């Protein structure tokens, strides 16, 4: 039976995935930065800062697939991003190398490409255009995952997660929603697919207005079922919470944060 580890189990998506994977019979070890309360007697749990190799070893010993949801998941000052999303991720991949983990499912983000405008329809070969230090760290993480596949044979699925929430609530979500049932299906595909190699996929549902194509991932067998359009009539009656800059770029409010207006930028010549 495939042994699966879930890091970041105390986070929003980890809290969703952990009980459902257990209910589906996955042989799961869940970890958070701090000790977790068991959901059932004898649940396999670990905890600790993943920048520490000993904590990484406890997480990954005997593991076949790591679902890596740990790290800073919002925009923060650069030193914090560097510590958690670069140093920590490198420690995790080195641990995967030590323990001969077959596959890492890396939680990348749409914010790695968030400075593309909303009028663009992007394929997976689009340019990186990060909208934040957070998005920049995900760009780096995808590169690290590629390196460890090419040099060390550790498979990776880099999933550029969109808006992973129970239901869409604003206009941007009509294009970026990653329904939680689709997320669960995606993770199950990542666990079950026999051979992956290195693959990047959009973490998105089958949204009519999606910025990104393809919405599915044939190599994984992922075929999203949910569509934000079911909520469009309700959402379109509401005001858009984003300002003009946030509405212009796919990263939304992340693109707006710390944005230098054109009249304050360096002059030509």
Image: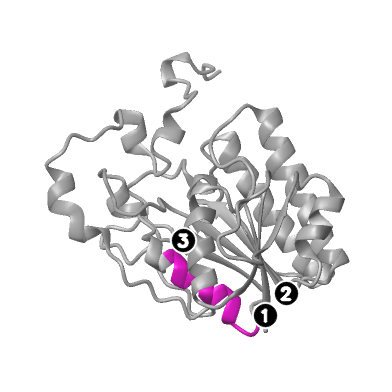
Decide: marks 2, 1 in contact (CB < 8 A)? yes
Q: Which residues are magenta?
A: 183-195
Left or right? Give the position of 40 relative to 173.
Answer: right
Mark 3 or mark 1, which is nearer the start of the sequence? 1
Left or right? Give the position of 46 relative to 230.
Answer: right
Q: Quadrant where the N terminus lies?
A: bottom right
Q: CA distance from mark 3 to mark 2?
A: 22 Å
Which residue lies under the disc numbered 3? 203
Mark 1 or mark 2, which is nearer the start of the sequence? 1
Q: Relative to 42, say whether 240 is above or below.
A: above
Dot 2: what SS? loop
The percent coordinates of residue 87 (x first, y second) are: 77, 43
Q: Residues within 10 Å of mark 3 (few under 14, many from 20)?
A: many
The percent coordinates of residue 235 (x first, y second) are: 18, 46
Our reading of the magenta stretch's main secondary structure is helix
How many numbered callouts?
3
Query: Can residue 210 be seen by looking at this rendering?
Result: yes
Q: CA distance from mark 1 to mark 3?
A: 23 Å
Which residue lies under the disc numbered 1? 2
Q: Residues within 10 Å of mark 1 (few under 14, many from 20)?
A: few
Dot 1: what SS? loop
């Amino acid at each position: 039976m495939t042994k699966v580890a879930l890091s970041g189990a105390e986070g929003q998506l980890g809290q969703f995935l952990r009980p459902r994977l257990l209910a589906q019979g996955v042989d799961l070890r869940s970890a958070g930065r701090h000790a977790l309360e068991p959901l059932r007697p004898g649940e396999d749990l670990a905890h600790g800062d993943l920048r520490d190799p000993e904590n990484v070893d406890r997480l990954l010993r005997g593991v076949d697939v790591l679902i890596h949801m740990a790290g800073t998941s919002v925009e923060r000052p650069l030193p914090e991003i560097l510590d958690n999303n670069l140093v920590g991720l490198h420690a995790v991949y080195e641990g995967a190398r030590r323990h001969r983990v077959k596959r890492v499912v890396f939680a990348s983000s749409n914010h790695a490409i968030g400075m593309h405008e909303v009028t663009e329809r992007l394929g997976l070969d689009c340019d990186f255009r990060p909208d934040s230090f957070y998005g920049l760290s995900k760009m780096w993480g995808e590169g690290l995952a590629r390196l460890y596949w090419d040099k060390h044979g550790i498979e990776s699925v880099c999933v550029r997660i969109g808006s992973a929430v129970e239901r869409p609530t604003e206009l941007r979500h009509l294009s970026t929603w990653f329904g939680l049932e689709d997320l669960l299906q995606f993770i199950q595909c990542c666990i079950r697919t026999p051979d992956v190699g290195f693959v990047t996929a959009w973490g998105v549902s089958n949204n009519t207005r999606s910025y990104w194509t393809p919405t599915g991932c044939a190599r994984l067998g992922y075929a999203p079922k949910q569509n934000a359009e079911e909520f469009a009539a309700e959402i379109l009656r509401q005001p858009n919470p984003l300002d003009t800059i946030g509405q212009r770029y796919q990263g939304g409010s992340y693109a707006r944060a710390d944005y230098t207006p054109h009249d304050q930028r360096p002059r030509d010549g």
